[in-house]
Amino acid sequence: MPCDNWRKCIFGPNVSLLTPIHPLRWQDRNQYVKQDGIPTDKEYAKPITIGNNCWIAGNVTICGGVTIGDGCVIGAGSVVTRDIPPNSLAVGVPCHVVREITEADSLENHPELFGDRALQLSNPSTSILR
């Protein structure tokens, strides 16, 4: 399976990376025997590139030929059929960019989410996750 990168990425359950590309016509999809007697077909694969520090939520399907940029979040159940630029929040079927992920999304700017723990999570010297 030709996939690339995904350092420090988080993958939810049931993520599918689908690299095969199948011809549309049944006449082209069916298996045939080459002149040397070996059965084959005309299926081929396109690579999937996932940047660093991405979060791919559960039940996401990523199709061949797609590049997902660094720092992206792909929402649960999305079907990624096109490239997603870096630092994007993208969701849907088909998957589309909702907005850019910015410094405003930092936990430091949302203490209501975790209270005092948000500051601990954002400061590596005090983090319980070290």
Image (cartoon, rainbow, N blue to C red):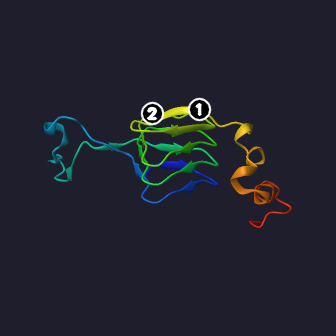
Mark linked to residue 75? none
Which x, y percent locates residue 112?
Answer: 72, 50
Q: Nearer the viewer, residue 1 or 36?
A: 1
Q: Is residue 59 above or below residue 78?
A: below
Q: Residue at x 75, y 50 (%)?
A: 111
Distance from label 1 to label 2 (Cα)?
16 Å
Residue located beneath label 2 in the image: 82
- At mark 1, the secondary structure is strand
Which x, y percent locates residue 104?
Answer: 73, 37
Q: Residues within 10 Å of mark 2 (few under 14, many from 20)?
A: some
Q: Residue at x 32, y 43 (%)?
A: 44
- At mark 2, the secondary structure is loop
Q: Nearer the viewer, residue 31 or 77?
A: 77
Indicate left or right for 116 with 113 as reference.
right
Q: Is residue 74 above or below residue 1?
A: above
Three-letter amino acid code at disc 2? Arg
Indicate left or right for 109 with 44 as reference.
right
Mark linked to residue 99? 1
The quarter of the picture where the C terminus appears is bottom right
Which x, y percent locates residue 89?
Answer: 57, 38
Between disc 1 and disc 2, whose residue precedes? 2
Indicate left or right for 79 with 43 as reference.
right
Q: Residues within 10 Å of mark 1 (few under 14, many from 20)?
A: few
Residue 72 sits in quarter: top right
